[in-house]
Image (tube, grey):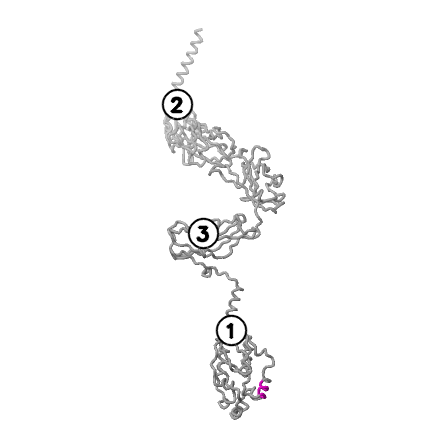
């Protein structure tokens, strides 16, 4: 048993001795494996490690080399190993890994004498930011019916440096108050407030991923878009929708109104503020709806289209006085869920026939008010009667439409009008001698027709009486019938022309009567009294009158203007004179406001002569001579020396 042990000991001793001998003789001996570390992103030439070998690497017989997969990251500088990096070649732990492995080979006379391992650990630096996984931050959809405190979605971010990540919701984002993060490192986002599709259909938040175990606290952000899916949680409502309060998606159903008359029948009714129409409260679902009349249909008088909501009147109203209004209750509900419904009121008013609009009986009313300290007084009119401005409507037998409403436009702080058309003034705020022009508007509240009139109110001084006659009224309106105005103007013009013609004719007549003529014939021709016309003058005047009668007419008493021969004339001359009188008595008949000549008696031709004013004219010598019963034949014949050419036509015969 001892002999084998001795052999083994001798072999070990020989090997040890061999190594000692060879070490003392080889220059590459004395080295060892190299373990070192270096930070990522270290610069070019960064020190890695020194080499412990017996020989000088610069000797001709000894040569060192680096080999292996990562040997290009190093280079030898004598007995020193340095980092081989550059601007384009950066040592990055996340790319190269955590350890660089190479081999140091020592050659002596081109013979490998030794091999040493080079293990370099790359120390990590915090040079990377967290990054979200794109699949976790894509837009997604969530139902509005999701319960509060439920996990809505989960995000995840990674850090290549291996740092721990925590997640934060940016509170400056518009919809951050809908969500919260319970466990910061989990990435789970929890719903903190109920969703409502009718209020918000889209939400947006900003989420941060931040390093939690480094002093740099590098972070990154992502925008998350959340689409809300509509759920069937709303009831239908009628349009137009009036919210109960701002921001609350609950509608107050309107009251639909329409007007009909007793003659309406078989017609589709038009309502205000719009047609009867409803929509599903869940706009994203928009479930089909159905309409029905719950009450007020009056045994089929009103029917509704269950799909469109149109209401039709099937038969006319029997008596407006018994049923002036109809009230219907209309219901709308979802076809797939009859428990989701809504009800609206419909008011149908029965009106009178509207054929004529209301009208005022005048365009301007005149009123008076006496200044006083009373706070209110009624405006009065002529004769101290109450001024009542009322419009009449021919659609009513008595002319009074109970639906007419009176108002002042524009509203006045001094006057008010009652529904009876009476004006009330604030007397203590009025000043004497003021004048106010008011516009009263009468509106038919059923038909919407309006008519207006002006009221001229004059403020009288205290103690001054109100005018008692309407002739002093000065209407402010210039609305006068053009035909009436034309007739008035024509009448005035005709009267003016008549006066002018009358004055001209009287002037001509006086000029003819005062013409001297031939003095030698005075004794033979009786001189006419002033204002009296002989036969010659009568004919001339008749011709002038006939020519002027076309321009106008005279108004007065009729008179026959004739001349009776004096007693001095012979019977023959009288006969001749009568033969020269006009054949037609109409030429001697005309109207003139001058005077009337009565037919003189046979013996007293010039006895009575009246002036135009009805007084007797004073007698003249010629008239006295003419009334003398004894003719003066010799005197008349001796003095008749007038030539025939100068004699009047009735004397020349």
Question: Mark 3: which secondary structure?
Answer: strand
Give left or right: position of 506 versus 463.
Answer: right
Name, please, the residue furthest toward the front: 629
Viewport quadrant of the N terminus = top left
Please, is residue 392 above or below residue 643 in the view? Answer: above
Against 514, residue 142 (above or below) is above
Binning the other alpha carbons within 10 Å of mark 3 as few (below 14), some (14 to 19) or many (20 upward) gives many
The magenta region covers 571-577
Residue nearer the viewer, 500 or 53: 500
The image shows residue 589 at horizontal and vertical percentages of 57, 77
Look at the image and say whether residue 536 sits in the magenta stretch: no
The residue positioned 38% from the left and 20% from the top of the image is: 23
On residue 498, the disc is 1
Q: Residue 209 lies in what quarter of the image?
A: top left
Q: Residue at x 58, y 35 (%)?
A: 334
Q: Residue 32 bears which disc, if any?
A: 2
User: Is residue 166 placed above or below 545 in the rendered structure?
Assistant: above
Disc 3 versus disc 2: distance between alpha carbons? Answer: 125 Å
Residue 454 left/right relative to 651: left
């Amino acid at each position: 048993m001892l002999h084998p042990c001795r052999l083994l000991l001798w072999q070990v001793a020989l090997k040890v001795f061999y190594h000692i001998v060879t070490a003392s003789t080889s220059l590459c001996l004395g080295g060892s494996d190299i373990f070192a570390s270096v930070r990522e992103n270290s610069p070019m030439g960064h020190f890695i490690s020194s080499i412990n070998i017996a020989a000088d690497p610069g000797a001709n017989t000894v040569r060192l080399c680096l080999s292996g997969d990562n040997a290009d990251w190093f280079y030898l500088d004598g007995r020193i190993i340095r980092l081989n990096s550059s601007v384009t070649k950066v040592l990055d732990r996340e790319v190269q890994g955590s350890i660089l492995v190479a081999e140091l080979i020592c050659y002596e006379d081109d013979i490998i004498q030794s091999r040493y391992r080079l293990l370099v650990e790359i120390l990590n630096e915090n040079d990377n930011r967290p990054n979200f996984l794109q699949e976790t931050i894509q837009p997604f959809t969530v139902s509005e019916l999701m319960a509060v405190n439920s996990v809505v979605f989960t995000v995840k971010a990674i850090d290549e440096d291996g740092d721990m990540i925590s997640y934060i919701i940016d509170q400056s984002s518009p919809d951050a108050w809908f969500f919260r993060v319970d466990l910061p490192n989990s990435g789970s986002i929890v719903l903190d407030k109920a969703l409502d599709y009718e209020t918000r259909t889209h939400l947006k938040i900003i989420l941060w991923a931040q390093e939690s175990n480094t002093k740099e606290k590098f972070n990154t952000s992502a925008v998350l878009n959340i689409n809300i899916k509509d759920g069937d949680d709303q009831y239908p409502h009628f349009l137009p929708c009036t919210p109960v309060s701002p921001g609350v998606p609950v509608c107050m159903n309107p009251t639909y109104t329409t007007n009909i008359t007793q003659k309406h029948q078989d017609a589709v009714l038009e309502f205000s503020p719009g047609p009867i129409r409803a929509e599903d409260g869940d706009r994203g679902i928009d479930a089909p709806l159905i309409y029905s009349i719950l009450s007020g249909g009056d045994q089929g008088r009103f029917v509704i289209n269950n799909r469109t909501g149109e209401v039709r009147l099937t038969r006319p109203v029997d008596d407006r006085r018994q049923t002036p209004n109809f009230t219907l209750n209309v219901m709308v509900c979802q076809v797939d869920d009859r428990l989701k419904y809504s009800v609206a009121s419909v008011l149908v008013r029965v009106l009178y026939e509207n054929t004529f609009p209301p009208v005022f009986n005048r365009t301007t009313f005149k009123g008076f008010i006496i200044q006083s300290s009373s706070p209110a007084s009624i405006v009065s009119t002529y004769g101290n009667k109450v001024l009542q401005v009322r419009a009449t409507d021919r659609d009513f037998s008595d002319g009074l439409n109970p639906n007419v409403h009176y108002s002042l436009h524009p509203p006045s702080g001094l006057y008010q009008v009652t529904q009876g058309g009476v004006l009330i003034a604030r007397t203590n705020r009025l000043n004497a001698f003021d004048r106010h022009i008011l516009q009263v508007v009468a509106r038919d509240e059923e038909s919407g027709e309006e008519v207006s009139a002006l009221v001229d109110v004059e403020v009288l001084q205290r103690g001054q009486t109100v005018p008692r006659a309407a002739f002093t009224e000065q209407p402010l309106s210039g609305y006068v019938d053009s035909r009436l105005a034309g007739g008035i103007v024509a009448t005035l013009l005709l009267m003016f022309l008549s006066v002018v013609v009358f004055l001209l004719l009287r002037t001509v007549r006086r000029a003819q009567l005062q013409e001297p003529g031939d003095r030698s014939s005075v004794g033979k021709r009786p001189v006419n009294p002033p204002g009296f016309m002989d036969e010659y003058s009568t004919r001339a005047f008749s011709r002038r009158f006939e020519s002027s009668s076309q321009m106008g007419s005279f108004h007065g008493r009729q008179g026959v203007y004739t001349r009776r021969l004096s007693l001095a004339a012979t019977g023959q001359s009288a006969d001749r004179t009568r033969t020269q009188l006009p054949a037609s008595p109409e030429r001697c008949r005309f109207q003139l406001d001058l005077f009337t000549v009565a037919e003189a008696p046979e013996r007293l031709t010039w006895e009575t002569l009246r002036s135009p004013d009805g007084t007797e004219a004073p007698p003249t010598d010629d008239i006295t001579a003419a009334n003398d019963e004894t003719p003066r034949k010799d005197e008349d014949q001796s003095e008749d020396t007038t030539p025939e050419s100068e004699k009047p036509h009735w004397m020349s015969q």
